[in-house]
Amino acid sequence: MQIKHHVLAACIAFGTIVCAGSALAAVSEADAARLGKGLTPLGAERAGNADGSIPEWKGCPDLGAPLDQLKAGDRRWDPYANEKPLYTVTAANMAQYADKLSDGVRALLQKYPDTMKLDVYPTHRNHCAPDWVYQATAKNAVNARRVVRGDNDGVEGAVNGVPFPIPQDGAEVRWNSNFRWRGESFETKVRHYSMTTGGDRVLGTQSLQYDQFEPYRQGISAEDYAAKGSLGWLFMQITDAPSFRAGEGLVVRDSTNYVQRDRQAWQYLVGQRRVRRAPNIGWDTPDFVNSGANFFDEVFGSPYTSQERYEYKLLGKKEMLIPYNNNKVFGLKEDEIFLKQHHDPEAVRWELHRVWVVEATLKPGKRHAVSKRVFYVDEDTWGTVMFDGWDPSGKLWRADLSLSYYMPDMPGVFSSYSDILYVLDGAWSSRNTIFYDTAYQMKAVPMKPDSVFTPDALSGRGVR
């Protein structure tokens, strides 16, 4: 697919840069008409690849899902449990698949040549969404626009779907990731682990988590959505272990237009018995939820946030081996997911998919511990499935794998929620990978009032 490039005009007013208008607007009616035809309703290439290893997209598959059981929040089901790997990639044969591997994955195979491998299974393009999401995405394609003010930007004219299903640049791909369809509201119980260099597993947090995606509040118009403040992803976490952290809480209110509203975050600490603003939750601040083993902007696929420090270049689309349909994890015990030096390769399923490749480099004058990142964004889900990071000296430093899950009750593939992060010169960590309660795994629930995700609500949930 050819990538269109546009020259963006800068509008300078007394030292403040404000860019908006047609240079940052959406595509034409003629281009948008490809959605649902040559493209899927969410903007992926509908056709498979030449040799058939990537199949044609045909919508939601009927796999006999136990929907009543899943909707009750019971242990989730693996639709592909009986499949066998087509082939296995190891350090010994990875040169044969080099063009299908990210830099980070190649580094992992080289670092653990005797124990790391990629079991590659048949590709299933099972991501889908309700019709109302498809219809909104088609409308967004011609109405959505990206607005920029200084280091902040945002999306206007979009709601209930992907804003830029036919992206023109790297920033639009990143915003699609923030807007990706992943249901409306759900709750789950998770554990976050970090590993010592000696291979010991350390529990960072065990918690009940609430996630809600305000852009998918059905029936709201783009105008009313903007008038309500362009709320994006809403998140609340209530910690119950380890014991010294039990009762802590965290609330995050993200936005889809950082020109209009910044990200807001609050933390409740038991020892202080009060809720405090937490502006440090972001960028390269060590993540206290996972014992500081990763940076805050490395979780959930590294979402696009306010005060952006990176410039994003769209490098194009390519076929790559990525983690996909990882429902097996839901049924595994912790010792079946974690080994001493790395995750158990048997626990992660790999498939061949097409991904958008986006390169992030620091803006002039900006600082971050990671000087460059490369994101791999699945064309079907718009979720970030992997990203690599380089240190200030230009050395490959970090490799992140984001697991995805097929959730027919959503419906679709839930992406960029579980992370396995490797610091290549140190230890590794895993966040949101363990769904430890057999009767509470990513349960879909009705949309809550956004007042549930506020500091007052957090204060009411905290231990006193």
Image (spheres, helix red, strand yellow):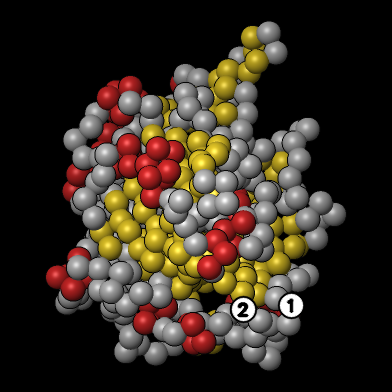
Farthest right residue in view? 393
Q: Amino acid at mark 2?
A: Arg
Q: Nearer the viewer, residue 34 or 150?
A: 150
Mark nearest the camera among 2 and 1 is: 2
Residue beneath the point at 40% across and 72% down: 435
Using the numbered discs, state the Cα–Cα distance from disc 2 to disc 1 in whole angstroms: 10 Å
Residue beneath label 2, please? 201
Q: Is residue 68 visible?
A: yes
Badge 1 marks a residue whose secondary structure is: loop
**Dot 1: few (<14), some (14–19), or many (≥20) neighbours within 10 Å?**
few
Residue beneath the point at 32% across and 59% down: 187
Q: Which mark is residue 321?
A: none
Horizontally, residue 206 falls left or right of residue 114, namely: left
- The image shows residue 340 at horizontal and vertical percentages of 65, 85
Is 108 placed above or below 283 here? below
Horizontally, residue 332 falls left or right of residue 275, namely: left
- The image shows residue 399 at horizontal and vertical percentages of 65, 65
Farthest top residue in view? 14
- The image shows residue 430 at horizontal and vertical percentages of 56, 69
Residue beneath label 1, please? 197
